[in-house]
Amino acid sequence: MDVIENTVALQLQKETIERCLRERGCRITKQRRILLDVILDENVSCCKEIYYKASKKDKKIGVATVYRMINLLEDIGAVSRGNLYKIEQAKNVHMNACRIELKDNSVIEVSLERWNQIVQAGLTACGYIDGQEIRRVIPKRV
């Protein structure tokens, strides 16, 4: 993936996360944007490392702010402690693939184009759409 595609992918991830946070009633502050940038742009493995890198950009960011942000990101499903604070969607965007984990622990990987075809066919078969095409899918976290 070239630099431009990578930049666009990261921006889309950031916008999606910000939208999810707004839907939960959160303001998108300068500090939250800095923390998102650190998590998206840098290889971080713990809250202390996020704090260290973010506090270089804004001295007012405290450790508690980092932990609260990580908890918010976990609540919306954007990060998990199991993947060392990497944004969940990052793998899918960079690989242009979707990984589907089944209950028997098997994993299917399909291209995003194929995933859209699967969703289109499923919506048609279930009677939700009739001839329309999917423009985009917007995840809603509860």
Image (cartoon, rainbow, N blue to C red):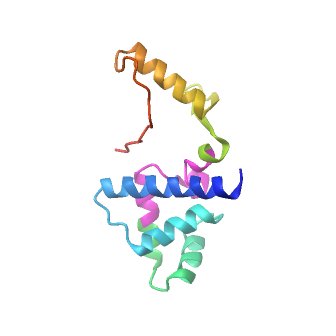
Picture layout, residue 102 above or below residue 78: above
Residue that appears at 58% across and 51% down: 82
For this orientation, the residue located farthest to the left is 25
Picture layout, residue 47 above or below residue 82: below
State the image quarter where residue 132 is shown: top left
Picture layout, residue 122 above or below residue 28: above
> Which residue occupies the foreground of this view, 75 or 5?
5
Residue that appears at 43% across and 60% down: 71
For the C terminus, the image quarter is top left
State the image quarter where residue 123 is shown: top left
Q: Position of residue 107 (x, y in %)?
A: 63, 30
From the viewer's perspective, is 100 left or right of 26?
right
> Which residue occupies the foreground of this view, 50 or 3?
3
Quick check: is 132 in the magenta stretch?
no
Picture layout, residue 64 above or below residue 6: below
> Which residue occupies the foreground of this view, 61 or 14?
14
Q: Position of residue 67 (x, y in %)?
A: 45, 68
Quick check: is 76 in the magenta stretch?
yes
Q: How many marks?
A: 0
Magenta stretch bounds = 69-91
Residue that appears at 57% across and 73% down: 48
Q: Position of residue 21 (x, y in %)?
A: 36, 57
Is residue 52 visible in the rendered image? The answer is: yes
Residue that appears at 37% across and 66% down: 28
For this orientation, the residue located farthest to the bottom is 59
Q: Position of residue 75 (x, y in %)?
A: 40, 52
From the viewer's perspective, is 72 left or right of 59?
left
> Which residue occupies the foreground of this view, 133 or 63?
133
Is residue 86 visible in the rendered image? The answer is: no
